[in-house]
Image: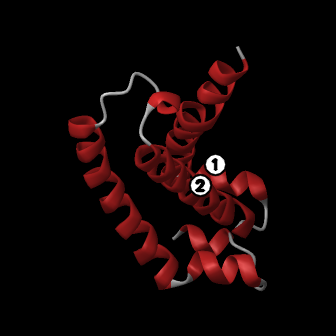
């Protein structure tokens, strides 16, 4: 259990260990999978900047949630390099980096050009 590497006190580790945090994250993952199907079916825009407002808001909401989730998990580690011992943390981090790139960085670069 990776939580053995977490701080033993403090609010961030308490959040990261809480079953509500885990269950909420699993629920958002399921909702994101459903949303991907909806987005694929109904969003004809070539980029997020060209999409209807609903698609922009929902994509940014998922991105913000997953970014906050990985940040909370990272900050819960007492020794930060221990996060590299957790396969799921590394996997989730790669997914979040890709999502941040797609949702925030690329639209920002496109808007600036």
| Secondary element at tag 1 | helix
- Residue 6 vs 69, above or below: the answer is below
- Residue 2 percent coordinates (x, y): 56, 67
Q: Image quadrant of residue 68?
A: bottom right
Q: Residue at x 63, y 19 (%)?
A: 110
Q: Residue at x 69, y 56 (%)?
A: 82
| N-term-proximal mark, 1 vs 2 | 2
- Residue 49 percent coordinates (x, y): 53, 30
Q: Mark 1 points at which residue?
A: 84
Q: Residue at x 48, y 32 (%)?
A: 48
Residue 8 in sight here? no
Pick the residue in front: 36 or 107.
107
Q: Mark 2 points at which residue?
A: 64
Q: In which quarter of the image is the C terminus?
A: top right
Q: Is residue 36 left or right of residue 1?
A: left
- Residue 97 percent coordinates (x, y): 59, 38
Pick the residue in front: 43 or 68.
43
- Residue extending farthest to the front is 52
Find out whether the residues at labels 1 and 2 contact each other: C-beta distance under 8 Å: no
Pick the residue in front: 85 or 110.
110
């Amino acid at each position: 259990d990776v939580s053995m590497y977490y701080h033993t006190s403090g609010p961030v580790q308490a959040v990261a260990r809480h079953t509500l945090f885990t269950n909420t994250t699993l629920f958002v993952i399921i909702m994101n999978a459903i949303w991907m199907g909806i987005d694929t079916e109904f969003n004809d825009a070539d980029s997020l900047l060209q999409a209807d407002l609903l698609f922009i808001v929902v994509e940014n909401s998922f991105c913000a949630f997953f970014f906050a989730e990985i940040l909370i998990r990272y900050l819960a580690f007492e020794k930060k390099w221990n996060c590299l011992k957790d396969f799921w943390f590394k996997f989730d981090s790669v997914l979040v980096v890709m999502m941040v790139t797609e949702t925030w960085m690329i639209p920002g670069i496109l808007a600036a050009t």
